[in-house]
Amino acid sequence: MSAPGRKPTVLELNTERHTTAIREGLRLRPRMAEPPPALGDRRWTADLILATWLMAETGQPPDGRWEHRVGDSGGGFDRLGFRLLPEGGWLPEKTPIDLSIPLNRRPYDPRIEIPVPWYGAGMSFGSVSEQVMLARAMTAREWNTFTCTGEGGYPDALRPYHDHVITQVATGMFGVREETIQLARVVEFKYAQGAKPGLGGHLLGDKTTVAVAKMREAVPWVSLFSPFPFHSVYSVEDHRKHVDWIKTVNPRALVSVKVSTPTDVDMVAVGSYHAGAHILQIDGSYGGTGAAPEVAKKDIAMPVEYAIPKVHRYLAAEGIRDELTVIASGGIRTAHDVAKAIALGADGVALGTVELVVLGCTRCANCERGRGCAYGLTTTDPELSLLIDPAWAAERLGNLYTAFQTELRSLLRRLGLTSVRALRGRTDLLTYQQNDASRPAVGGTPCTSQQ
Amino acid sequence: MTAYSRYHIHTEPCPNRFPHPNRFRVRVGRPGLARHLIHVLIRYRANLPVVTSRPCVYGTFSGPVGGFAPRPECCVGCLRCIMEYPEFVEVRPNPERFSLGDSYFTPDKVDTVLQEAATGQVPVRGAGYRGAFGGPGWDGMWTDMSEIVRPTRDGIHGREFISTAVDLGERPAYLRFDAAGAVLGRLPQHLSLPIPFLFDVPPASAESPVLYETLARAAGGLETLVIMPLRRLIELRSPTDSCVPLVSPSEVGMLADLPAAPRMLELTGWDASAHATLRERFPAAAVFVRVPSDGDLGPLVACGVRLFHLTASYHGDAGGSFVGEVLRNTHAALVQAGLREECVLLGGGGIITAADVPKAIICGLDAVALDTAALVALQGRFEGEVLERATARIRLPRLDPAWGAQRLSNLVAAWRDQLLEILGAMGLREVRRLRGEIGRAMFQAELEREAFAGIAGFEG
């Protein structure tokens, strides 16, 4: 906004006009009788989106008006539920429930714990605006968890939050510098991304603005491809060299390895362990992206629901499960998805798309087009990105985290667990719905088997 | 000696020529808009650049009178307008789109094919996957990738070479020679295509000379083939060596009317005598036998048939099972018999997206015959469920062969590029290596059993 006494510019007035209207829409829409007819898709139904907006505003789980636990994809998390104890067996309301997880399970290197079993997934500068990155970093600091730079450099605005920002090193090495590796407590190698496994990164030319190009040390308005794979890694030994490189530059850093979900994802997990990784992030094929070939989103690599138990069991069989933190990502939309991922065998999750939905994303899938997102999220357009005020956005993200925390604690209490760590790998607490017939109607009352 | 040239498909923008329904309908309540404008006129003191600032960055309200005459063709469904002005703006999915395609070739898939045919490019979009988790048919199958492989994605951009060539000719395990060293019997025919696609014979309701001319022109440019009924081929004004006659046993006598010896022929149904006649009459041609996928190939193999075109319904149904499962079984049986390397399996039915091609090849096909997708690329409109060649009704617009051939070339280019993406992700250098590689695919039923076995309610 304009400085006191100065006449606001047209851009400032336009930003104010539209920002006010969008925020009012985010407040009103979940309270209207019917969902907008064109909102939502099978993974992110209108109900899920509206419920997320409501949580972002109130900081509370929705009151049941919108189906906020499952989407309508007909598989994976949307078919899983929990076997809750009878009400008499629930833990008392006041029982402390611990949601913290360790990010380092090795007997050496710094101990880092986060108080909630999630952190923010990588989203690069270029795929999202600096304002969005900043808001995510502010929330990460507030919650003592992390967010991740993605592969697009490290904007200066993030430096005050460096203790809560994971520096990502990916195949294009865009914006990777020794100093940004030294800033981080966790450094993430992105080998592959769930939404485009085996294809590398892709930033279309329209979004490679002068600022983005400068950050990435590239040419403006030219499409930028991160190659696939790392051209320096063809074995676990090469992978080990990568980890050693990071540890040489920043001996205190934990190393996370982000991989996709091939048929041998379990072997990849073991390889990452032997290479010295502290965290393995398995990114399922239904995750988000700023731009990807449609064929890659659906048809390459398995959904994370299948990959988690595969990795968990194999690591356990190898006797190394308790030395590696497994983070699941790629399709985690709700607190229930968080709990299901952990029950399938993950330690925690990384949140991506849901954080954008909190800020107004309607899942229209035009992130890559022209100036980018009409809501100022997945854009670097200097005018559109002003639609997001980092402080407002951080407050909404914090509210979502609060709602997730409340819901997760409530779920654990009804499962009779005092710690989220005790949920890991407890597939015996899950139920599977063989068909969709018993799904609650959209916006309807919760069904008994799927609480 | 000819100089080496890398296979290349010429693409160029080739927009739809016939009306196609917009994705959305946009309705603006004019009284509400008028009231809103008065409000902002006052609020912003008639600052016109602010008052006329519109919520749509895609131009839906950028016409001369803004929201009073919205342009729904520009709407991409971002819904910012309905967020900002819920009282008087509404965006709905366009119900006209429900009539596109049918229950298998859904409107979204029609849109994808049309986009590919119009641009020749791989569809790229933001956000994640938006559809069903898995499902029957190809949707319940995922292809593999590798974290550390070569060739890399560079292959897609031509800096490394990934071959999409396939061999359709006979491949005897060995040759026999007489005492003088001369080859005994028929020499194997060499028939290679640079892409694993050819065009199948279209449904009877869509047939016309201009359609066949379009298909033949496209096939010629792509260096591939088009299958057409023998009578249609004889009638064609300018047949090319890309044309493959589809011959029924009763039509063998008409072969004399063919303008030139074809490189490949297809015999519909099994008739030993007709098959022998075709092989004898066209010794340099590959003679395929067109049979249903769910039939038993054993007797035909015993009769020496090695080249098969396996058919299924346009929805991928093969005798009550999905064609992918049937192909896996057929491929496995031939492997078991030690004959797979001698046989060629060409197949079609239910292959309507670029991703279906590598999946069908993984299930056992050598190459794919495109059917309904090609007609959708030409803006053919389905009338009812399109299931079988004899009964399917597809209404094609008036075709210009040059436009149609470019649309088909664009479609094939986009599909080939997506095939390269998938091969690159797997680290395969050639599509021939993909055939029957079940280990490079993941099947929903198997993944579910592995992941969810033991979970209450799972019956896998």
Image (tube, coloured by chain):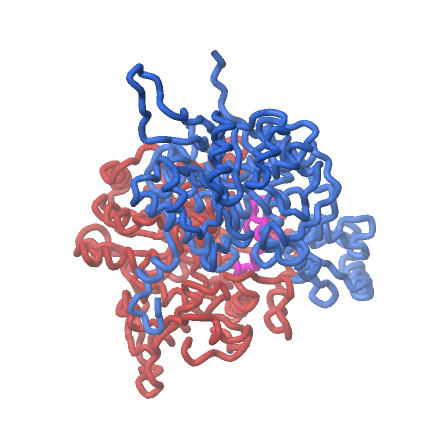
Chain colours: A red, B blue
x, y percent for residue A64: 51, 77
Q: Quadrant of residue B171?
A: top left
Instruction: Please report the residue visible at 33 percent of the width from the left and 39 percent of the height from the top.
Output: B339
In this image, A192 relative to A223: left or right? left
In this image, A15 relative to A437: left or right? right
- Residue at the extreme top: B1
Instruction: Please report the residue visible at 54 percent of the width from the left and 38 percent of the height from the top.
Output: A211
Task: State whether residue A140 is above or below residue A412.
Answer: above
In this image, A263 relative to A69: left or right? left
Q: Is residue A196 visible?
A: yes
In this image, B30 relative to B160: left or right? right
- Residue at the extreme bottom: A88
x, y percent for residue B88: 74, 65
In this view, the residue in front, B182 or A244, is B182
Dominant secondary-structure state across the stretch colored magenta: loop
In this view, the residue in front, A9 or B297, is B297
The residue range painted magenta reads A357-383
x, y percent for residue B442: 37, 51
Instruction: Please report the residue visible at 64 percent of the width from the left and 39 percent of the height from the top.
Output: B118
In this view, the residue in front, B69 or B389, is B389
Residue A368 within the segment the image draws in magenta? yes
